């Protein structure tokens, strides 16, 4: 959940309201009386448009140098394959190396793992790249979410709607309490993303008659983006 900076809260009340409130209250501080604290929320479900995946190579060797050579060679080959798919963002992920011991606590070998991470809004290209990589790497996970640009645009829209909902609720409460008006004491806007990923934890295997791994069709699912406006108003009796 993100707590938005104060400069974005201006849209909650509108510049005209802030100006009139400043003029009418003239240096006055909230009294602490006739204050109401409440929250409004708006949300929207949206189709996931970004796929994220992680694949890894795990190996063992008698010495650390041989292990590093195996892992680095495998990851370098995977990165070379990924260059054929420019619409997919590829990055090296977590890597780990640790010794194996015998019953006398003597090092008898080394085990290591190296990951690469994929991210893209091009589902077709990503699916084919994953299939290509699974000839030598193992799938660690696969999930879906909302791309940053799409989420930011939706959050901007929902912030405006949450602001209006907060103001409308303030007006409703003002009437319910038989007040002449209200002033905003504080308001916070917070965003949330309830993602519904569809993870995979095992690699796809090739058909017995095929020498390559078949690509997979993706069903990305949806996520819900929400914005809450919580704050306090003071009633003018």
Image: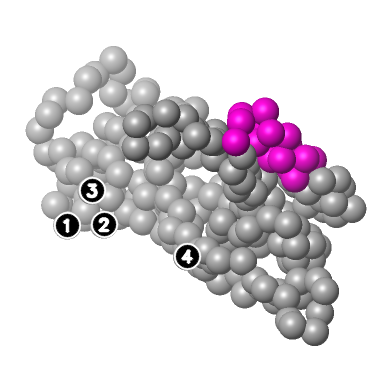
Q: Residue furthest bottom?
A: 209
In this view of the protein, which residue sits in the foreground, 112 or 76? 112
Instruction: Find out whether the residues at labels 2 and 4 contact each other: C-beta distance under 8 Å.
Output: no
| Residue at the spot of label 1 | 176
- Between 173 and 200, the residue placed more toward the observer is 200
Secondary structure at numbered mark 2: helix
Q: Are marks 4 and 3 in contact (CB under 8 Å)?
A: no
In the image, residue 166 lies at what x, y percent?
Answer: 35, 50
Q: Is residue 32 above or below residue 81?
A: above
Tell me the SS state at disc 4.
Answer: loop
Residue 227 placement, left or right of 176: right
- The picture places residue 121, in percent across and down from the top left corner, at 72, 58
- Looking at the rendering, the stretch of residues picked out in magenta corresponds to 62-76
10 Å crowding of disc 4: few (<14), some (14-19), many (20+):
some
Q: CA distance from mark 2 to mark 1?
A: 6 Å
Q: Tell me the number on the disc at residue 172.
A: 2
Q: Nearer the viewer, mark 4 or mark 3?
A: 4
Determine the image quadrant of residue 206: bottom right
């Amino acid at each position: 959940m993100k707590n938005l900076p104060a400069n974005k809260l201006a849209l909650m009340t509108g510049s005209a309201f802030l100006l009139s409130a400043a003029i009418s209250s003239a240096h006055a501080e909230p009294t602490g009386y006739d204050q109401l604290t409440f929250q409004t929320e708006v949300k929207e479900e949206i189709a996931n448009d970004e796929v994220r995946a992680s694949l890894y190579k795990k190996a063992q060797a008698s010495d650390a140098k041989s292990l590093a050579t195996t892992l680095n060679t495998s990851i370098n080959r995977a990165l070379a394959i990924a260059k054929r798919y420019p619409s997919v963002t590829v990055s090296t992920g977590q890597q780990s190396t640790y010794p194996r011991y015998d019953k006398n606590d003597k090092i008898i070998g080394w085990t290591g793992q190296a990951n690469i991470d994929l991210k893209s809004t091009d589902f077709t290209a990503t699916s084919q790249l994953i299939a290509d990589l699974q000839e030598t790497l193992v799938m660690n996970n696969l999930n879906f979410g909302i791309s940053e640009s799409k989420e930011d645009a939706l959050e901007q829209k929902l912030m405006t709607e949450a602001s209006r909902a907060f103001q409308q609720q303030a007006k409703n409460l003002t009437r319910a309490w038989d007040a002449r008006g209200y002033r905003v004491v504080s308001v916070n806007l917070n965003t949330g993303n309830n993602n519904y990923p569809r993870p995979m934890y095992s690699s796809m295997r090739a058909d017995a008659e095929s020498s390559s791994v078949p690509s997979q069709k993706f069903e990305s699912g949806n996520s819900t983006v929400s914005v809450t406006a919580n704050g306090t108003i003071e009633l003018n009796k």
